[in-house]
Image (tube, rainbow, N blue to C red):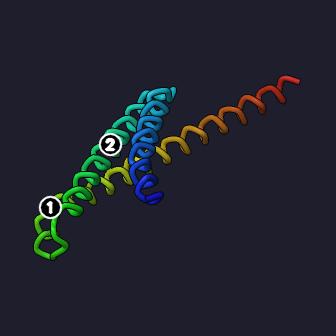
Amino acid sequence: MENVAATEEAPDLRFERIMEYLQGSLHKQDALQANLSAANADLIMIGYRLARAIEAAMATGPASLEAYEDLMPAISNLLRIHKQVDRFSSLDNRLAAARAAVKAQAAAVIAQSEDLKI
């Protein structure tokens, strides 16, 4: 019985974490990163809901290969969503790294110019 309660709570926690990610995305200072992360949150939410629908269909139907064959298009779509989430996440990380490098370089230039003033 304890496992059932934990399983029922997990989707709600996952939904909350997706919403936290969306809210964090919208508060990013860079507009491109904010929108990219928000789009990623949208995809994560779609994937989450699709996964729940697949799980529900698997739980109600018989455990036969024929039954799973009917679910394969949905499972394929879920995998494509996960791939796109991965791509957006990688792009977001590259943008963040590039911005950090530019800031570090700008700080070094400023520090160097201040050293020259003395």
Residue displayed at 73% across by 28% down: 110
In the rendered image, the residue lying farthest to the right is 118
Residue displayed at 78% across by 33% down: 112
Q: Disc 1 versus disc 2: distance between alpha carbons?
A: 18 Å
Q: Percent position (x, y) of residue 96?
A: 53, 41
Instruction: For label 1, count other residues whose C-alpha is less than 10 Å away and answer few (under 14), some (14-19) or many (20+).
Output: few
Q: Percent position (x, y) of residue 38?
A: 38, 35
In the rendered image, the residue lying farthest to the bottom is 65
Q: Quadrant of the C terminus?
A: top right
Q: Quadrant of residue 109?
A: top right
Q: Name which residue type carries label 2.
A: Met
Q: Percent position (x, y) of residue 14?
A: 42, 46
**Front position in the image: 93 or 71:** 71
Q: Quadrant of residue 12?
A: top left
Numbered marks: total? 2
Is residue 8 left or right of 56 when viewed as pictured?
Answer: right
**Residue 45 numbered mark, or none:** 2
Q: Name which residue type carries label 1.
A: Pro
**Front position in the image: 77 or 111:** 77
- Name the residue tied to disc 1: 73
Using the image, determine if residue 117 lies above or below residue 33. Answer: above
> Is there CB contact under 8 Å for labels 1 and 2?
no
Is residue 88 left or right of 105 when viewed as pictured?
Answer: left
Instruction: For label 2, count other residues whose C-alpha is less than 10 Å away and answer few (under 14), some (14-19) or many (20+).
Output: some
Residue displayed at 23% across by 62% down: 59
Is residue 115 left or right of 46 when viewed as pictured?
Answer: right
Using the image, determine if residue 3 lies above or below residue 29. Answer: below
